Amino acid sequence: MDHFHYRAGELWAEDVPLARLAARVGTPFYCYSSATLARHYRVFTEALAGLDATVCYALKANANRAVVATLARLGAGADVVSGGELMLARAAGVPASRIVFSGVGKSRAELRQALRAGVMQINVESEPELMALEREARALGRVAVVALRVNPDVDAGTHAKITTGKSENKFGVEWTGARRLYQRAKSLSGVRLAGIAVHIGSQILDLAPFRDAFVRVRDLIVMLRADGHAIDRLDLGGGLGIPYDGAATPAPTPADYGRVVKEIFGDLGCRLVFEPGRLLVGNAGVLVSRVLYVKEGATRTFVVVDAGMNDLIRPSLYDAYHAIWPVREPRADAPLREVDVVGPICETGDTFARGRALPPLREGDLVAFRTAGAYGAVMASAYNMRPPAAEVLVRGRAFAVVKPRKTAAQLFADEKLPKWLAAPSAAKPRARRIKAGKAGTKKSRQKRAR
């Protein structure tokens, strides 16, 4: 359930009509619903009732500071994968004691940043990273609390570009090698291996891969405890999928997911950490765009909108489906026509939908790309020197522009020309002057004679 609905013939975000926002902000723009964020967070946490659970929102899904702050005020921690995300989480009000630092390629500077901040946990993904963290922690006189991320070699059945739990993926330590690393860590003074972390991918629409991975992780914890290691926390990552309105497979509910977690880990006595991202923010956002032209091609009809793949790259990158709703509510008996919805960028890949059955659209109409709150604005770029879409947060009847649209001039305002290009006179090479009479110089006449 979300809070985008038709009312009096228009599409509203909570108690604000999207057409009013378009008139105020211009298009394209992202609109996020505070009520939807709150509802999704509440539903997920209620599914974990009875567990010692910490929910750390994965900033990579949507890093707008207002979105992060909204979830932080509800009690969410943060899962970060870069030093920049760590800074943002702290700026949004997330306490360091509720931050998990994940990621397969943390730099030495990022490790030091996490240690100085005193984050709750660092998820280590390789033996070299473990040793680098040991050195940095000892140099700072700190002890890093670590969860070792294991790769359970489980196929999540999701898109190849967002699966992370198979043996050929770059993430985590092979699960059979975890016992050796735990044994080695006993001699280290800068790190304390306190738990196991696992994350098998994103947009998972089947609970079976979760169950398979969780059973394997449970067996590993039992073995590690038998070896004498104190395992007091378990990070189960995120990845639970959401409906994109075009998915053939319905998404399992958080309650379904919670039952699997309780069945497998309810008696282990571990503090559980979860890292939902898309689940919390995906359906909490839409991208609103305006129709520029309706173009009749030789074999297809193109609806050209002012949003591009630089604003929402998911259809181009993942062949992702996003439902497209006219902002003006169509008649119940409106005829549908198959069209391609495309953007203005000079790429054939700048296509949001092919052969999509939509009600009649005209130049100037507004459309909303649904389920755009995750991996939308956060993956935007300024390709073709197009300023990315503005971002708006709605709360009841109130709204605020939480990320203004930049001007084209602002996109390159911080670029500098080198000295040889900055001074106009320096850009012109000095021409060699040759004095020659009508018949040429004496030397040239001699050359011609030879």
Image (cartoon, rainbow, N blue to C red):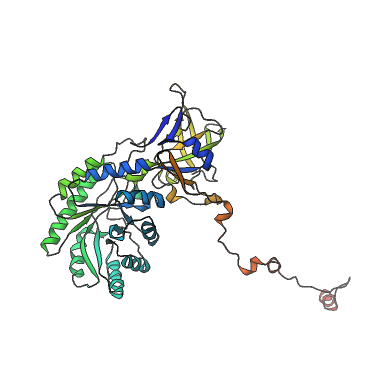
| Residue drawn at x 25%, y 42% as measured from the top left | 254
Residue 303 visible from this viewpoint: yes
In the image as oriented, which residue stretches furthest toward the front?
Answer: 397
| Residue drawn at x 33%, y 65% as measured from the top left | 117
In the image as oriented, which residue stretches furthest toward the right?
Answer: 438
| Residue drawn at x 29%, y 62% as measured from the top left | 119
> Along the line of sight, which residue is nearer the eye, 45 or 409?
45
Give the answer, above or below, for where 384 lies relative to 366. Answer: below
Q: Position of residue 450 (x, y in %)?
A: 81, 76
- Which quadrant, please, contains the N terminus? top left
Q: Is residue 365 left or right of residue 199?
A: right
Q: Position of residue 78 (x, y in %)?
A: 32, 55
In the image as oriented, which residue stretches furthest toward the top?
Answer: 333
Q: Is residue 268 left or right of residue 305?
A: left
Q: Position of residue 394 (x, y in %)?
A: 42, 42
Q: Position of residue 364 (x, y in %)?
A: 56, 34
Please identify the quarter of the rendering in which residue 294 is found: top right
| Residue drawn at x 71%, y 68% as measured from the top left | 425
Q: Is residue 232 left or right of residue 133?
A: left
Give the answer, above or below, for where 334 lies relative to 374. Answer: above
Give the answer, above or below, for where 162 lies relative to 426. Answer: above
